[in-house]
Amino acid sequence: MDYKKAGVDIEAGYQSVELMKKYVKETFRPEVLGGLGGFSGAFDLSKIKDMEKPILLSGTDGCGTKVKLAFLMDKHDTIGIDCVAMCVNDVACAGGEPLFFLDYIACGKNYPEKIATIVSGVAEGCKQAGCALIGGETAEHPGLMPLDEYDLAGFAVGLVDEKKMITGKTIAAGDTLIGIASSGVHSNGFSLVRKVFPMTEVALSRYCDELGMTLGDALIAPTKIYVKAMKSVQDAGVTIKGCSHITGGGFYENIPRMLPEGVNAKVLLNSYEVPPIFKLLQKTGSIEDQMMYNTYNMGLGMVLAVDSADADKTVKAIEAAGEKAFIVGEVVAGEKGVTLC
């Protein structure tokens, strides 16, 4: 008896590392010390000397049951982008710059090419966010997970000077709400998605006129990474008073998280066009509006609160970073929460 016969292939692990090295190295920043394969990742923090009060920010998350879609479509090159996005967007929400990222892949069996493909997506997400992929782990769990399945999670660390942190404390009645477009469902609510749509090869490969693509392609579209858009707004001289990353819980849970007591976020539903994938999902599943906006991003991956005088400048800065933005409402006096109208 040996470890391989017990279900863990150490040689496959070595091969995975060799295959992923080229992707990982593409994410390295000058602050990365050493290479891939050490017991820990090292990152030079000398730049904190230039800050009055440096604050470390962190975020950890996974992709939820969206990985099931990756299994069904046998498409594993974008799920890593989702994982990075879920973490670095939270760091950006606080005004921070993501510095480095680590991933964790648990699998039933280590197929080196598949693992390397997953990591290529993680690396692509890191490049989009400007952070370095400095470490990770691939754990083989025979007997615990099906041989052809895996789960993916990640952890990001970022940095911000305390005076530039986005806390929501200064949000006041009269401020403007800016929404940044999402790429679709992102990485939340897939347990409901999988109940509404048949999760079969035929259904997922079917071209939908209303979507302009197949159902599978619309659903697996990777989560938007908003780091560059947030930096563009900050570089334009705009003070972002508050920021919400619209993830699980949709509008109703996430927008109030940025608000202080005594104000309400009034979102105008006709201020932007809800993407077709959400309309198809709601129609097919007979899902009520309340549930849709309490589960999905409904086309807005981020919502910012800025002074009304900075509204147009904010939209232009976001568009300059290659994203779509909309003025979607305002902050009014009232009970802390969100009102859709």
Image (tube, grey):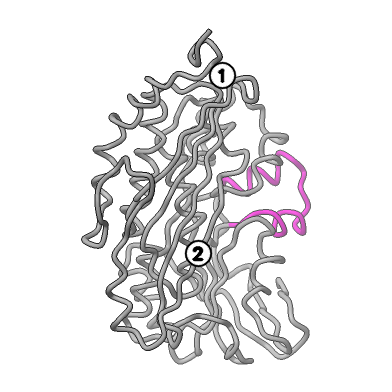
Instruction: Name, please, the residue furthest toward the left.
Output: 30
Query: Front-most of 268 and 29?
Result: 29
Residue drawn at the location 32% of the way across and 60% of the way down? 43
Q: CA distance from mark 2 to mark 1?
A: 32 Å
| Position above or below: 183 against 160 | above
Determine whether the residue tagged by mark 2 lies in a helix, strand or loop.
strand
Nearest the viewer among 126 and 252 is 126
Please name the residue that numbered disc 1 is placed on: 147
Label 1 SS: loop
State the image coordinates of residue 298 (x, y, percent, origin top left).
61, 57
Residue 288 among those drawn in magenta: yes
| Residue drawn where x is 63% and y is 85% of the image | 331
Residue type pointed to by label 1 = Leu
Residue 264, by quadrant, is bottom right
Tell me the crowding category of disc 1: few under 14, some 14 to 19, or many 20 or more residues within 10 angstroms, Cα based: some
Residue drawn where x is 34% and y is 58% of the image: 131
Closest to the observer, 19 or 339: 19
Region of the chain picked out in magenta, as a range: 276-298
Q: Position of residue 207 (x, y in %)?
A: 50, 30
Residue type highlighted by circle 2: Ser
Mark 2 highlights which residue?
58
In the image, is 173 to the left or to the right of 224? right
